[in-house]
Amino acid sequence: MNTIILFFLFLSSSSIHTVLSRSLFNFQKLDLPSTSVGPDSITFDSFGRGPYTGISDGRIVKYNTSYFVEVYITSPHRTSSKCDGTDNPAILGPICGRPKGLDFYYKEKKLYIADAYKGFLVGEKKRLAVPLATGAEGVPFKFLSGLNVDQLTGDVYFADASSVFQLSQITAAVLANDRTGRLLKYSHRTKQVSVLLRRLGGAVGVALSSDGSFVLVSEYIAKRIIKFWLRGPMAFKSQVILNLQGNPTNIKRTQVGDSFWVAVNKMSLGLTVPIAININENGVVLRTIPLDRYYFNTTISEFSQRGSNFYVGSLQADFVGVLKK
């Protein structure tokens, strides 16, 4: 009973339809390369291979049956001797890169990348990803994070968490209640980046609807989920659809329909409590999965579903977590 009471306090009062799930899963760890940490965003290619993830030392790696192998880097200045296995964003981030958001455009077999230090890039045939943009409308990117590709058009939607603070300054951004984040769009047709939303409080997660009519944005600092309509009678308008007491990170749409998984971290009694929340397009919470059993006092960065399996990213872990029924 105490767990249920604590959880309802965790969510806003508008989410009274929540179903709390304490289901036990078979938990598997996909270990990262030695001494590496921080699998942030998780994606799969058009053949279902992966997971692919970006890690703290600047590499993008792919799980190849039983281990991770390097597939892309985002910085031309990166060296294995200086960067491999490191986790020092303040000093090495600008040198090694820090890939955050990842998503494939299946039609062209391209991996689009939002790097916190190196900007917006694409991975194709070569190991070094190709830069596409380092700013939008005269304002340089400071802290790129979540990213999602529209498979129908090839357009890419991504978030800049702040126009002032870098990844290594996230604590300062929270203390300043920073509201300089932006929602951005890369046009596949024009190859230009435009700004869709401004004044966001730590925009870190982006998820497009199945028909491309709207996009959801998670705001880490503002502790809420925003819905932005791309077309229809509400086109180019936005609305807060869910307020949280915890900090949401990445948001991912399920493979079928328009429901979304949000990774959320809350502080309780001095401990970090990670929870995955499944919401519909209106912000109604459909299901929750507490993850403290698998990530004790550890933050999570993403919770995504592929088939019957769930994949968990964490900036503090040295593995990708897989929950299986």
Image (tube, rainbow, N blue to C red):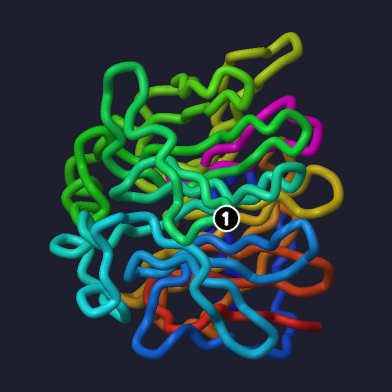
Q: Nearer the viewer, residue 106 or 239?
A: 106
Q: Position of residue 213 (x, y in %)?
A: 74, 25
Q: Measuring 34% from the left and 17% from the top, which residue is drawn there?
A: 137
Q: Is residue 107 left or right of residue 30?
A: right
Q: Position of residue 154 (x, y in %)?
A: 68, 33
Say if the magenta span includes residue 207. yes
Say if the magenta span includes residue 276. no
Give the image quarter of residue 284: top right
Q: Position of residue 277 (x, y in %)?
A: 63, 59
Give the image quarter of residue 99: bottom left
Q: Measuring 80% from the left and 63% from the top, which residue is drawn there?
A: 47
Q: Amino acid at mark 1?
A: Lys
Magenta stretch in the rendered image: 202-217
Q: Is residue 140 above or below residue 261?
A: above
Q: Which residue in the structure is indicated by mark 1?
A: 125
Q: Is residue 88 left or right of residue 191?
A: left
Neighbours of disc 1 within 10 Å: few (<14), some (14-19), many (20+) = few
